[in-house]
Image (cartoon, helix red, strand yellow):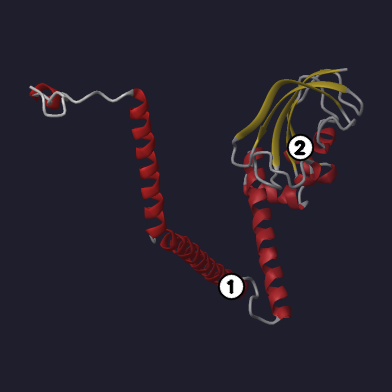
Amino acid sequence: MSDVTGVPAATADDTSTPRPKSKKELRAEKKAAKKAAAAASTTNNEESPTKIPKAESKEEKYRLKKERRKQQLKEREKEMLREKKERQKKRKARELHAVGGGQNPVEAAKRLEERKNKKRRKKEQTDILLESKFFGRDMDVFDKVFNGTGEEDEEGVRTLDLGVKCKDVVLGKGARVENGSLLTVMYKLKSGKGILIDSSKKFVFRVGKGNVIRGWDIGVRGMAVGGTRKLIVPPKAGYQGQDIGAGPGALLYFDITVLACT
C-alpha cells in the first residue's frame, strides 16, 4: 500500500530494526564523549575549593612540625642542665667526703700522709708474713733475719742487691753460675697466696745480659747445676708496678732449679 505521493509506507518490520551505525559515526560519538568528559572535569576542578585547603594544610603541618622540634630542643636543654647539676652535686659530695675534704689544706695534707703511712705499714706487715710462710720459718726468727738482728747465714736466708732475698733449698754440685753464663733452668712463679702464675720445665737465658728481670740476674749468681733456690723479688728488681697476675707492685716468689750451665 502506498500513500498519495507514491512513496511506499513504512512497514512494522522497518520501525523495529534500526540501521546499524557505521565506524565513522562510532568514532565521532567516542570523540564527542571524551570532549564532554574533559569539559566536565575542567569545570569541576575550577569550581572545587579543595586546592586552597590542601595548601593551607601543608603549611599547618610544617608549622606544627617546627613547634614540635622547638619543644624537643627545649626539653633536651633542660635534661642536659639537670644532668650537669647532678654531676656538680656528685663532684662536691666526693670532694667533701675525700681525705681532708672541706678542711684546712694543711690538716688535709697531714691526714692524707697519715693514711698513706698506714697503708705502707700494712703492706710491709703483709710482705713479712708472706715471706715467713714462703721460707717456712717462725715469725720471730724471720723478724730477726728481716730486721738484721740475727745472723742471716744461720737461717740460710740472704738479702742481695735491690732487696732480693734468696734461700738455697738444694745445693748443686755442678758448674757454678757466673755473670755471662748460659743457663737452662726449671722454675715456678707463685703469688703471695700460693697461686701458680707461671712455670717452665726448660727456660734458657744468659745471666747479666738483660734477658730476664734483674731479680733473676742477681738471684741466680752463685748457684750450681742441680741446685734449687727460692727467690723473693721485690717490684724494683722485677716488673716495677706492672701486674703480671700477683697484683700491681706485689712481691714475686720463685722456685728455680739449674739444669745446665755453660
Element at label 1: helix
| Nearest to the observer: residue 101 or residue 228 | 101
Work out whether residue 50 can be spotted: no
| Picture layout, residue 30 above or below residue 201 | below
| Nearest to the observer: residue 83 or residue 16 | 16
Q: Position of residue 57 (x, y in %)?
A: 43, 62
Quarter of the image where one finds residue 256 = top right
Q: Residue at x 13, y 25 (%)?
A: 10
Q: Which callout, 1 or 2, points at the residue further toward the start of the chain? A: 1
10 Å crowding of disc 1: few (<14), some (14-19), many (20+)? few
Q: Position of residue 141 (x, y in %)?
A: 67, 47
Q: Nearer the viewer, mark 1 or mark 2?
A: 1
Q: Quadrant of the C terminus?
A: top right
Q: Residue at x 83, y 45 (%)?
A: 162
Q: Position of residue 99 (x, y in %)?
A: 64, 71
Which residue is tagged 2? 166
Work out whether residue 1 can be spotted: yes
| Picture layout, residue 49 above or below residue 40 | below
Quarter of the image where one finds residue 171 = top right
Q: Quadrant of the N terminus?
A: top left
Q: Which mark is residue 5?
A: none
Element at label 2: strand
Q: Amino acid at mark 1?
A: His
Q: Residue at x 76, y 23 (%)?
A: 227
| Nearest to the observer: residue 163 or residue 75 | 75
Q: Residue at x 73, y 44 (%)?
A: 242
Q: In the rendered structure, are the residues bearing label 1 and label 2 in contact, judged by CB atoms less than 8 Å apart? A: no
Which residue is tagged 1? 97
| Picture layout, residue 117 above or below residue 111 | above
Could you tell me how far apart the alpha carbons at marks 1 and 2 are, in whole angstroms?
Answer: 44 Å
